[in-house]
Image: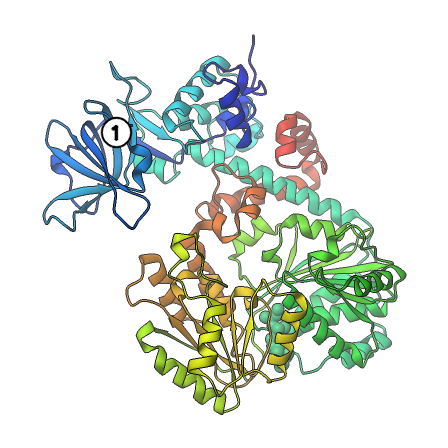
């Protein structure tokens, strides 16, 4: 049969039903998908390193022969360590595989093996070099297979039992079968302008790089072929964003009245304090959007504590004055309740009706709230994901506000928008995203930034202490408490885990709460707050803490976002080495919200792992959310940083917005000019009409073109 890029992979030699199923789980169904599964790394297997020449601290690829291997079990740890000895013509090398049980019986003396990893000094045997958890690949018996050695070899992430080596075979066969029929969706004019190779050449190149290519260039994704494929992903992604944006701008939205004296009066009545210049500017931008007859799509970005809430409530007031409803969605119940309480206070003088909708409500209360939402009696509805449930029907939803947007998926924002014809949308986030990345993630949004803190804030002091200093820390808490201030003590887990080994030694909120109350702070009132408590219990504890009936709140990351109790000035985070950097910054943002100086004490070992050290040092050094986000992004990479779900939705195979931001800018410019300059209309039509269906679907271009 004649294969095309859209032929299914199960027709490929070497891919049976089992493998086809494995591949399908990774979204690989067609030849095209398979060729889009790109190597994450390359190995130089033309010039292997000699074992004798290996020096500690460097990374090597060696080709060797297995001498022996055995599993060493240690009594306590459940996973054993697999010790492997190999040799080449120059010498022998020892390797250790932690949790290496799976290797038992798999490697046999005499087998040829390729090892890739970093060489280290063996701490137990001075002067000896070893590799810890190297990547390995067994070579086939007999003559060297030309896809395995003697060339620059692409390394693929294994998919179940489909190892990198199997993947190379399959992809090789796929390319053979296709015989060079790989269409190019990029406009020829762009290819020529940037001197990019054709898609066909680029695909061949990345799977079978020529011997003359430098491995370094390949591994840093700088070859022309890789750059082209990266550009391609960004280009179509940005094209889809730009088209969606254009389509949205052409939709009719509600043109709210903003300038009338009655509305100005209402805004003044609602405002509890003098807004900062930055808050005024942000509200001005939002008001201008509200006034326009097309739906607003705006991101309000500003560091923790800069005062986004009041800006959102002012926007809500405009919409309510226009006779429409406003929905405010928060990621946690605690935050939803807090917004509900503060909105009720803020809106009391204006007489707006505020309602709460969370899943932990009593059925009768919930029913009543739903009815008020339906009838239009509820003017501001604050809630959690519960707002997305189908039985929630709004009478006249005019504005959707999503707080702490980074905690929600893009899809959830859409779901809420679909509750009304075309509401205006305001999303807020404290995660200061580097500009290029916000273009990728929120490319369809306009952005307002609050880059200024309310007046009178004193910078928080952050210290890193070890467990040994806890008595002194508790003493400090006692003094602050005597001076009338409140404190949070944060733990990484609610309860000690009996099963998860990695968590067994962690201090847990419930146990520590009891211990601290009994033995450390018997004369103070402590509260306990964690995510597994019932909604009412959570509300009750938060309310008592707010009213200063509690001196110290023992808690977990449930308070990470949004919680606002200005009298709390101290935060102690135990096992701080376990928390992510953005998470630590968010937690710390709970204090230093009033005019008093805040103190954050991170309890962590003196010598934690390398990444943990960077995180802790960054926290001590700076309170600048932007700097912290950049460091976090560098430590974790964009996928982790935004949560896997969001990353997955972006659907990039090879492009990495952080590493490739120059190409991202380029692709964005090209996509925009194709969508926005009037002369580009024919070119755009041509491009979209020739783009294969799969591509349209992949970049969601079909629905918007
Ligand atoms: P975030 O942007 O993190 O959501 P909030 O909206 O919770 O911050 O505001 C943080 C604190 O600062 C709140 O206690 C709020 O009342 C206070 N605040 C906000 N704006 C001002 C202002 N212009 N003047 C004084 N206090 C303000
Ligand atoms: Mg907030």
Q: Kindly tell me whether mark 1's CB lies below 8 Å from ligand 1.
A: no
Q: Which of 316/238 is in front?
A: 316
Ligand 1 - quadrant of the structure image: bottom right
| Label 1 residue SS | strand
Q: Is residue 148 left or right of residue 687?
A: left
Residue at position x 74%, y 78% in the image:
346
Residue 683 is at least partly visible in this image:
yes
Residue 665 rendering spot, x and y as whole percentages: 52, 47
> Toward which corner of the image does residue 60 lie, by quadrant?
top left
* Left or right: residue 56 compared with residue 315: left
Q: 321 or 80: nearer the eye?
A: 80
Residue 607 on image: x %, y %: 28, 64
Above or below for 15 versus 363 = above
Residue located 78% across and 47% down the image: 250
Say which quadrant the C terminus sits in. Answer: top right
Instruction: Say which quadrant the N terminus sits in.
Output: top right
The residue located at (67%, 30%) in the rendering is 688
Q: Give the residue pinned by disc 1.
A: 114
28, above or below 60, in the image: above
Say whether residue 449 is left or right of residue 78.
right
Q: Is residue 92 above or below residue 522?
A: above
């Amino acid at each position: 049969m004649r294969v095309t890029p859209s032929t299914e992979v199960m027709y490929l030699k070497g891919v049976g039903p089992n493998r086809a199923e494995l591949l399908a789980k990774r979204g690989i169904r067609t030849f095209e998908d398979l060729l889009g599964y790109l190597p994450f790394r390359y190995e130089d297997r033309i010039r292997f390193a000699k074992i004798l020449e290996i020096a500690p601290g460097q990374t090597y690829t060696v080709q060797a022969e297995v001498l022996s291997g055995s599993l060493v079990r240690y009594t306590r740890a459940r996973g054993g360590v697999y010790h492997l000895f190999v040799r080449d013509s120059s010498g022998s090398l020892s390797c250790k595989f932690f949790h290496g049980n799976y290797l038992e019986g798999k490697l046999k003396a005499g087998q040829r093996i390729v090892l890739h990893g970093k060489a280290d000094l063996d701490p137990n045997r001075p002067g000896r070099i070893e590799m810890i958890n190297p990547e390995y690949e067994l070579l086939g018996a007999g003559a060297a297979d030309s896809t395995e050695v003697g060339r620059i070899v692409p390394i693929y992430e294994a998919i179940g039992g489909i190892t990198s080596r199997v993947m190379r075979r399959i992809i090789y066969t796929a390319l053979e079968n296709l015989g060079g029929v790989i269409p190019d969706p990029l406009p020829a004019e762009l290819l020529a302008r940037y001197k990019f190779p054709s898609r066909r050449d680029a695909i061949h190149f990345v799977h079978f790089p020529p011997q003359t290519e430098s491995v370094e260039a390949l591994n840093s994704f700088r070859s022309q072929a890789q750059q082209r494929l990266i550009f391609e992903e960004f280009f179509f992604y940005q094209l889809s964003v730009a088209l969606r944006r254009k389509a949205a701008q052409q939709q009719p939205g509600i043109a709210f009245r903003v300038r009338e004296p009655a509305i100005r009066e209402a805004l003044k009545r609602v405002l509890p304090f003098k807004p900062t210049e930055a808050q005024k500017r942000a509200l001005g931008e939002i008001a201008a959007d509200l006034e326009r007859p097309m739906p607003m799509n705006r991101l309000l970005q500003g560091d923790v504590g800069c005062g986004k809430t009041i800006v959102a409530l002012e926007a809500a007031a405009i919409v309510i004055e226009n006779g429409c409803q406003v929905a405010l969605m928060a990621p946690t119940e605690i935050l939803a309740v807090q917004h509900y309480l503060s909105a009720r206070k803020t809106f009391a003088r204006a007489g707006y009706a505020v309602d709460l909708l969370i899943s932990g409500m009593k059925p009768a209360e919930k029913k009543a709230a739903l009815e008020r939402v339906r009838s239009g009696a509820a003017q501001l509805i604050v809630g959690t994901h519960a707002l997305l449930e189908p039985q929630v029907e709004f009478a006249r939803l005019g504005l959707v506000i999503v707080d702490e947007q980074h905690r929600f998926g893009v899809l959830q924002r859409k779901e809420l928008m679909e509750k009304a014809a075309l509401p205006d949308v305001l999303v807020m986030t404290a995660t200061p995203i580097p500009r290029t990345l916000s273009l990728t993630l929120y490319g369809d949004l306009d952005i307002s930034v609050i880059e200024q803190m309310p007046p009178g804030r004193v910078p928080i002091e952050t210290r890193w202490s070890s467990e040994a200093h806890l008595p002194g820390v508790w003493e400090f808490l006692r003094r602050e408490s005597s001076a009338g201030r409140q404190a949070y003590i944060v733990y990484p887990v609610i309860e000690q885990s009996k099963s998860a080994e990695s968590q067994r030694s962690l201090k847990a909120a419930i146990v520590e709460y009891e211990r601290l109350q009994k033995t450390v702070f018997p004369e103070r009132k402590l509260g306990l707050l964690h995510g597994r408590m019932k909604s009412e219990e959570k509300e009750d504890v938060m309310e008592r803490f707010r009213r200063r009936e509690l001196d110290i709140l023992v808690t977990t990351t449930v308070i990470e976002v949004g919680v606002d109790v200005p009298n709390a000035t101290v935060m102690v985070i135990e096992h701080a080495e376990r928390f992510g950097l953005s998470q630590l910054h968010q937690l710390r943002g709970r204090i230093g919200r009033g005019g008093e100086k805040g103190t954050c004490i991170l309890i962590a070992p003196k010598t934690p792992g390398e990444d943990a050290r960077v995180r802790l040092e960054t926290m001590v050094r700076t309170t600048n959310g932007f700097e912290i986000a950049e460091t976090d992004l560098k430590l974790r990479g964009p996928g982790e940083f935004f949560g896997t779900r969001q990353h997955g939705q972006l659907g990039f195979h090879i492009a990495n917005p952080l590493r490739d931001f120059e190409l991202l800018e380029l692709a964005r410019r090209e996509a925009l000019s194709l969508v926005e300059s009037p002369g580009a209309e024919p070119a755009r039509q041509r491009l979209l009409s020739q783009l294969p269906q799969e591509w349209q679907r992949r970049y969601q271009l079909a629905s918007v073109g």
